[in-house]
Amino acid sequence: MPATAAAAVTVAPETLTITWLVAGGIIAQLLILIVFLVRVAWWLSHRFTLIDATLAGNAKEIVALRADVSNDIAGRKVVAEARTDIAQMKATLAEFRERIDRLESHEDGRKHA
């Protein structure tokens, strides 16, 4: 055999089997990791969708409450104005009663005189 010939590398069949088993295990673990990450992403997406829906519902309720509060405030203003008007009417009626009483007593004084 000449000295320039390359030496052949021989690998035992058991080594090839172990290499394929390790490679297969790594591939299986990567697939499991990918499936896990996809499920986590789906779950997070689902949760965010639910949170968005809840926030949208809350926003609608807040808008409705604001409208109710605005209506309530407007109603209270109207009631306050009405109370002022009613107080003025009562004062005017009381004034009319006093005048009527004075007129009646004056008229009665004329009748008796």
Image (cartoon, rainbow, N blue to C red):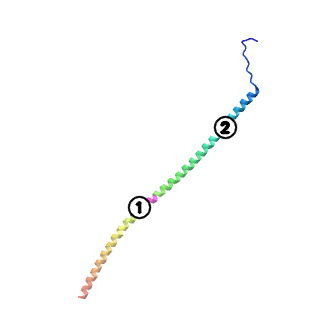
Residue beneath the point at 50% across and 54% down: 60
Residue that badge 1 annotates: 74
Q: Is residue 19 left or right of residue 81?
A: right
Name the kind of residue labelled 2 in the image. Answer: Leu
Residue pictured at 59% horizontal, 45% vertical: 44
Front in this rendered view, residue 108 or 19? 19
The x and y percentages for residue 39 are: 63, 43
Q: Which residue is drawn at 27% across and 80% down?
A: 102
43 relative to 75, above or below? above
Quarter of the image for the N terminus: give it.
top right
Magenta range is: 67-73
- Circles 2 and 1, Cβ within 8 Å, touching? The answer is no
85 shown above or below 102: above
Which mark, by number, is residue 31? 2
Left or right: residue 105 compared with residue 37: left
User: Disc 1 on helix, strand or loop?
Assistant: helix
Q: What element carries label 2?
A: helix
Residue type for callout 1:
Ala
Direction from residue 70 to residue 110 in the image, left or right: left
Q: Which residue is drawn at 36% across and 70% down?
A: 86
Label 2 – label 1 distance at C-alpha: 64 Å
Query: x and y percent of residue 6 in the render?
Result: 72, 16
Q: Residues within 10 Å of mark 1 (few under 14, many from 20)?
A: few
For disc 2, the neighbor class at 10 Å (few under 14, some 14 to 19, many from 20) is few
Asked if residue 69 is among those painted magenta in the image, a careful observer would answer: yes
Picture quarter containing residue 31? top right
Q: What is the magenta segment's predominant secondary structure?
A: helix
